[in-house]
Image (tube, rainbow, N blue to C red):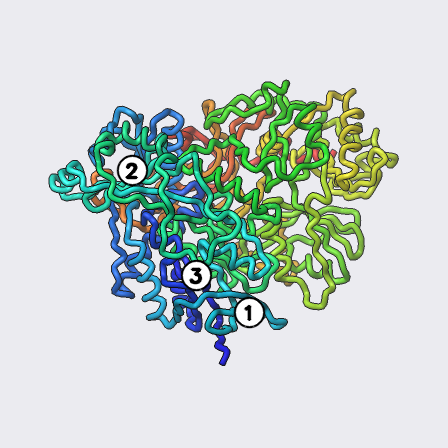
Amino acid sequence: MTRTYRAVVIGGGVVGCSVLYHLAKAGWTDVLLIERSELTSGSTWHAAGGFHTLNGDPNVARLQAYTISLYEELERISGQSCGLHLVGGVQMADSPERMDFLRMAHARGRYLGMETELITPSDAKAMFPLMDERHFVGALWDPVEGHLDPSGTTQAYAKSARILGAEIELRNPVVELTQDADGMWNVVTRNGTIRAEHVVNAGGLWAREVGRMAGLELPVLAMEHMYLLTEPMPEVIEFNQSTGRELVHVIDFKGEIYTRQEGQGILLGTYEKACKPWSPVQTPWEFGHELLQPDLDRLAPSLEIGFRHFPPYEKAGIKQIINGPFTFAPDGNPLVGPVPGLTNYWSACAVMAGFSQGGGVGLVLANWMTTGDPGHDVFGMDVARFGDWATLRYTNAKVRENYSRRFSIRFPNEELPAGRPHRTTPIYDLLVRDAHAVMGDSWGLEAPLWFAPSADEAHDVPSFHRSNDFAHVGAEVRAVREGVGVTEIANFAKYEVTGPGAEAFLDRLMTNRLPKPGRLVLTPMLNPQGKLIGDFTIARAGDERFLIWGSLAATKYHLRWFGAHLPKDGSVRVTALETDLVGLSIAGPKSREVLAALVDGDVSNGAFRFLDFREMDVAGAPAMVNRITYTGDLGYEIWMKPAFERRIYTAIKTAGAPHGIRDFGLRALLSMRFERNFPTWFAELRPIYGPMEGAMERFVAYDKPGFVGREAALAERDAGPRLRRVTLVVDADGADAIHDEPIWARVGDRDFGTIAAPHGHGAPRFDATGKTLPAPIPARDGDWRVVGWVTSGGYGHSVALSLAQGYVPSALATRTEAGVFEVEILGQRRAARIMPQPPFDPTGARMRS
């Protein structure tokens, strides 16, 4: 007899058990977890078991904090110990650059409510006396860090799920997945077929194979990972006896080492440069509770540094070397959520840091499955962030690069080379070879960042400060503002929506009114909770044909949303054009003269107005032209099939030569968008903000009935937004805000009363000695407190201002006087003030002239 469940979770590691627990906790009790062997048979059982809250993505950090806070609940429900050791941890900097990195991490932790602390090497040595502090310049203390028992923790999830009504079936491999016409899945196992409304792939090492059962190639790769355990060490025993405490965790960036106490000895692990993939094409099904052959030679460079930095290690005996595989995605973050193109097939894969992230992954996935919304901003973990271009070999190259750089600094202007160039346009060689472009990776596509005067100078010098591109980007901006520039804009998402139902379909999804024929509109898109999930330019190209431009990185994310809302009658077709349509933008006061030289029609301001759309020949090639640019200046977007791009680009350069035309790149474009206060998707516009919070209300037709999220948007409008996006002028000194820096304000009782960190995670607060810290005190009039955060920042070259966009409480958003705000950059609080109007062309006259 065939059994039927609402959801089947495939995989019995910590992530699968977390998903099961959270589904049951959310009320879905008719759920089943199927495991091919025993619980923890994949990567979980041999994990080092560390956990921490710090993460480069604050949204992921919040979920890591939730994961850690969950363990007490699991122990209480299940009666199973997780073996928690909340000892805290220090990250050690050996250079000024790494110290800048730690200052940034410390500052970003402020608005998360994290009580990290910058300390001296001597302070760190007091907590971990096995180190030689002479090799370091500083450290970051994080009290919410520690380790646990991987097996016990997984069992705690499993037991808690069972108590809530979920079921677990062991020693029953899944061999096939099929889906019926009604959408139900047939989970074919060795012991029979199980029907399920939903399937969750938490396959861990076998996630790729479970994906292939559904015709899916997930971008995951397993890497060999080694750590060693020492024999008992007298230095460890002496510290425990003299202090009554356990040694803290330590990350040594120079040695690419993490280390901590294990028993009376030490655990030491590395992310070595000479890393090695495991089973890069097919994971063997028979693999289980086994370890891989150790290879100490691969670890030798890290161990050599480790022995200098931690001298007692060199004399310690090695008790055991663990070498086991862990799965990674190309960027190191998990792959979570509904898989685009499949119905009710969910991913919970590539969760490398399972004991830091597993609880958060289970929470958001259960929210998503049971309510239709993850309840958190999880785009950084969304399975939809990769496209079909993330092939097996590309994934292999990027995962190896990511693994080898796990403890390396990623500078804001640093582009990583593995797997590149991967996707290119027809003018790639003209930009790189002839124009000396420095290229960046934009969703697998090469895009020009800036242009150097010579091939020898065409490279970035990685830095947290203004770097070697600064003057050249400034020259590009001034060329556009004073004359005309050209840039490639292939790195936009492009969609064509056609069919008799196209207008009604888009009218329901978009907040703004749709354009008339031959016109453009700018419009957000909301989810039912009234949060921003998209920002688009839409052209009406015919009665039943619309063209849409948006964020390239959100292509799969938006296609999934479009697909979920398509009418069942087939009256609408959505096509992602991707690189089948490429584009060039010309901008600046001379751009009309350049365009006029390339077309046969009238492009005067009266004949071709701002926000007009026109299909016309450009340089004799068929094209579509939008009267709009992201520079905030007079300009045009020219879209064409790839076969015509070289012709149009070279014609633009020829026609623009008398006007001093100059190539400009993405960094100049972003500089100019700061000068006009333009927001961008994934920075300012994210699914945690409403349209009024994002200052996007002018693009919302509140009186238009029936669009998704309207009721929530009206409620936000009527109640007033909690936060507000603002632009700040910052008194920067050689280093501009980037993103996630805290915004400080001089506030008091008349503004807020008691000020809490905007995203406090509620974890225990300790100082560097392990002493519990008191709760935050109420704000007094005139106090400085962290009240917001920067979403993006940079230098406005044509206005000579350091600019930052960010969110602050609405009560402070109108405070434009000096002395109210500061932005913390690399450990220094810099004076800032709100600029209510764009610093360049405040009225937008140049765009419309």
Q: Tell me which residue sits at (57%, 28%) in the image.
A: 796
In this view, which residue lies farthest toward the left?
242
- Depth check, mark 2 against mark 1: the one in front is 1
Going by the image, does 631 lie left or right of 140? right
In this view, which residue lies farthest toward the bottom?
1
| Label 2 crowd (10 A; few <14 / some 14-19 / many >=20) | many
Q: Mark 2 or 3 closer to N-term?
A: 3
| Viewer-proximal residue among 827 and 270 | 270
Q: CA distance from mark 2 to mark 3?
A: 32 Å
Location of the C terminus (image quadrant):
top right
Q: Quadrant of residue 20?
A: bottom left
Is residue 791 at all visible to an observer of this figure? Answer: yes
Helix, strand or loop at label 2? It is strand
Q: Mark 1 or 3 closer to N-term?
A: 3
Up-down: is 231 above or below 300?
below
Helix, strand or loop at label 3? It is loop
- Residue 564 image offset from top left, x and y in percent: 61, 61
Q: Which mark is residue 250?
A: 2
Q: Which mark is residue 247?
A: none
Q: Tell me which residue sits at (61%, 31%) in the image.
A: 439
| Label 1 crowd (10 A; few <14 / some 14-19 / many >=20) | many
Up-down: is 266 above or below 165?
above
Query: Label 1 sits on what residue type?
Result: Trp
Query: Label 2 sits on what residue type?
Result: Val
Q: Tell me which residue sits at (84%, 38%) in the image.
A: 617
Q: Which residue is mark 3?
A: 11
Q: Tell me which residue sits at (46%, 73%) in the image.
A: 191
Query: Label 3 sits on what residue type?
Result: Gly
- Residue 99 image offset from top left, x and y in percent: 36, 29
Up-down: is 815 above or below 717?
above
Going by the image, does 341 lie left or right of 819? right
